[in-house]
Image (cartoon, coloured by chain):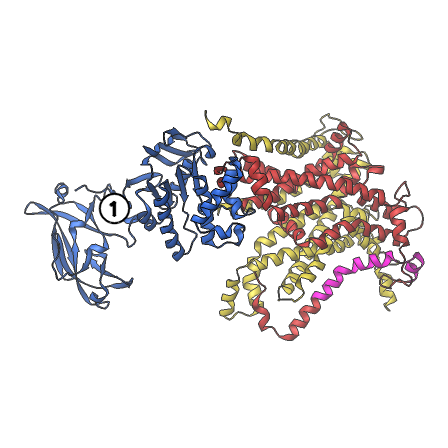
Amino acid sequence: MSSRTAGAGMHPGWRVLTYAILLVAALYYLLPLFVMLNTSLKSLAEIRSGNLLSLPQDPSLAAWSKAWGSACTGISCDGVKGYFWNSVKITVPAVLISTMVGAINGYVLSKWRFRGSNLFFGMLLVGTMLPFQVVLLPMARTLGELGLAGTVSGLIMVHVIYGIAFTTLFFRNFYIGVPDDLVRAARIDGAGFWRIFFRIMLPMSLPIIMVSLIWQMTQIWNDFLFGVVYSSGDAQPITVALNNLVNSTTGVKEYNVDMAAAIIAALPTLLVYVLAGSYFVRGMTAGAVKG
Amino acid sequence: MSRSKFDPQVWLPKLVLAPTMLITLVFIYGFVAWNAYLSFSKSRMLPRYDWAGLQQYERLFSNDRWWVAAQNLFIFGALFIVFCLIVGLLLAIFLDQRIRIEGAIRTVYLYPMALSFVVTGTAWKWMLNPELGLQKLLRDWGFENFTFDWLVNPDMAIYTVVIAGVWQSSGFVMALFLAGMRGIDDSIVKAAQVDGATLPTIYRRIILPNLGPVLFSALIVLTHIAIKSFDLIVALTGGGPGFSTDVPATFVYAYAFTRGQIGVGSAASMMMLMAVVAIIIPYLYSELREKRA
Amino acid sequence: MQALTINNVRKRYGDVEVLKGIDLDIAAGQFLILVGPSGCGKSTLLNMIAGLETVSDGTISIGDRDVTDLSPKDRDIAMVFQSYALYPNMTVRGNIAFGMEIRKVPKAEQDEIVTRVSTMLQIDHLLDRKPGQLSGGQRQRVAMGRALARDPSVFLFDEPLSNLDAKLRVEMRSEIKQLHQRTGTTVVYVTHDQIEAMTLGDAIAVMKDGEVQQFGTPQEIYDSPANLFVAGFMGSTPINFIPCTVHSQDGVPAVTLVSDHGEVTVRLPHYAALQSYEGQEIIIGLRPEQVTQVDSAGAPPGTITFSAPVTMLEPTGPDTLVSVALNGQRVIGRAHPDAVPPVGQSMTLQANFSRAVAFDPKTELLIQA
């Protein structure tokens, strides 16, 4: 699991070159973030006179407060704050519900398999690959029938439904690695289905719970497709509001406000990534390699 | 008193899984079938359930905008995948050389994956802005005649989507490859060193050939991202200039939800499904074969 | 009273029958070993006794209760697993007490039992640790402690020692034996290791392909294996199989063996049943310890001597295993280290055929003397 021992025989010149390439690549990845931050701190006049990399002469948070509280997104001019809280209201319950359901499903599909359960797991996996465009129209109709069209509750429902395939996959693959003997020992000790789940399985699931929470949080927070199709007006999530703000054609283009709003939209997932990056990577690779 | 009938351990797991099974059947398989039916119906502004055979598909295939979208997906997908794989693989190899600050560098390479494609699109839209973006930066640096107007050039705009897409996803491919390299048994590498293999030989003959499965996974994921690409295009180019950067995903949205052509939209989405099925089937096949072996 | 009765038990998965009608019964306090190669069905049978797998056909009784359809918790059993199956999130104390907690044993009694069991197993200083902080041998003890705390009428062990290194395995083996002698509880113990089977068991069931090949005491199984498979499976140095043809010498069945230095004819007077095999081929089974250096004090009756060049030597310390060719077959003997010549030189050995067994090559069954 260690790095190649090969570094030992490498010419010092190659090592310098290796580091140089890695650092240039790092700058390339950091550039857009820096530009966004830089631009968000400048005034419009300064943006026009300077360039992407010229530092702000007089850094100001004015663009940030406008983006948060008074920028125009489509019809209303109250900034993105309402939409930010919409995203929170959508993300928190959808993440919690889908993770909980995924944990129980994964437990059944790994430790209580029955005739047809593997087939069902295969069918569920298709859900992780489904291009959601295929279900957009029927779901729109269904949400309408249920009276949930254009509401936060409707979006929560959609995210839970199409997130379960992923969370189930995570937990199922995690629990497959837990020895079956553990469940057998607990059954001999007299524990039943729920007690084994809550007393034995769940307490050892912290890593995969984190993976699932973080994966679902990034997916749902960053979602745009369901948001743009199934929400309207006051119920829109932040991604949709950001797009409306940036692409609204009326008035003067305020790049600094756009960038501040973009960073606000990115902040929660970036924060999670910085704090729990390893779980984030595990989730992505688990979803990728197994999904 | 047979256990199979009265013991809760027998029926409880099935009961617990039942809601998910129902959801899967209705909201995945049922909805796909429903959507398929719409694509064979006369639906326009509103869903209508009169059978129309292949009429919607005929309209789709005679639509120039659809063919632009399909062609764009092909161009974008191919370049996006190739560049992500190249950049990801190279960075993984460089990062595999006992780099001191590997953790920090990896974090930097990967953070774009945590961003929404809408944010990525917004950032790159600003940077690629022909007046105030990179073009101005380079001109300020003394390259007076530097011109970079791909974003507003209908022939070149699709390539800006590639640039932003590769920026966002190549770090992820790097992480996949790096994990794959670290997963290779160290003693194999040591054996090769004992046999006198040089570093490039070790990579070329031992490590890279062992990354086949990782490459395959990366290919599947990237293809999947490419086909589903929607938010990046909406945020970066809005499908424009004109509809020069339309892809199937934006085409479906436009026809099904803004232009009131439900039938054509659902037919187009079925074509997207076909594309995904075409990549899933070899994947599932290889997965199943591995399990049997 | 019988502690455990297994009556014509079968297990089918679809069309595949993995247990083909098992009949076993043991008295209370006995130590039953289920031994056989992997895939023979021994673990499946143990799981069925535990109630972790359903029984397709037949019945299982513990004591005088038919438990065939009872769930594991109602069978009055405890089980020790190969992987130990300790609950990773609970302390050692929690692991041992979990079953009692579920059965709502009063707290004071739980504490008392945990103390008693952990003292007995010398793990009382580990009670507040998590399984992840324990060594392999300590985990093994905790797993046994969890089973002991239950005080069941039958203990089930599923290859409990196979994850331990060689030295620890021998140690734990004798501890399990002592524990059994102390508690006197009935044990069913699954292993693929014939040494464990021989050393621990009061009764051994040798299994293969879902069938019991032989059920008996360790000595019966070692001395009169029911068939070629049992003969070959039991014994740490494999038994010698020598194919040869039966003829009659003065009305007594005999076989002639060819070595590099001529022929020897062995009369097998105690093997009356061989008379009907006259002119036919049989397979003689001879344990290595019956082939040894010539004893100057004289050989027991039924012993022959022969000479052959030594082809290989394997010193084990107290003895050296000597390979020679007899009847074109490699035969291993067990000789005193001082008595063996270097490889390539000839050695004279004596073979005690009064302890030999004979098998019918067609049915592979023991020819009963």
Magenta stretch contains residue A28: yes
- Residue C48 placement: quadrant: top left
The reply, left or right, for residue C229 in relation to residue B48 is: left
> What residue did someone put label 1 on?
C219
- Relative to the observer, which residue lies in front, C124 or C174? C124
Helix, strand or loop for disc 1: helix
Please state the extent of the stretch shown in magenta in the rendering.
A22-49
- Residue B15 placement: quadrant: top right
- Residue C325 placement: quadrant: bottom left
Q: Quick one: which residue is furthest to the left in this view?
A: C250
In the figure, what tint was chain C given? Answer: blue
- Crowd rating for badge 1 (residues with CA inside 10 Å; few <14, some 14–19, many 20+): few
Query: Vertical placement of C180 versus B202: above or below?
Result: above
Quarter that holds the N terminus of chain A: bottom right
Magenta stretch contains residue B139: no
Chain letter, red? A
Can the viewer see residue C70?
Answer: yes
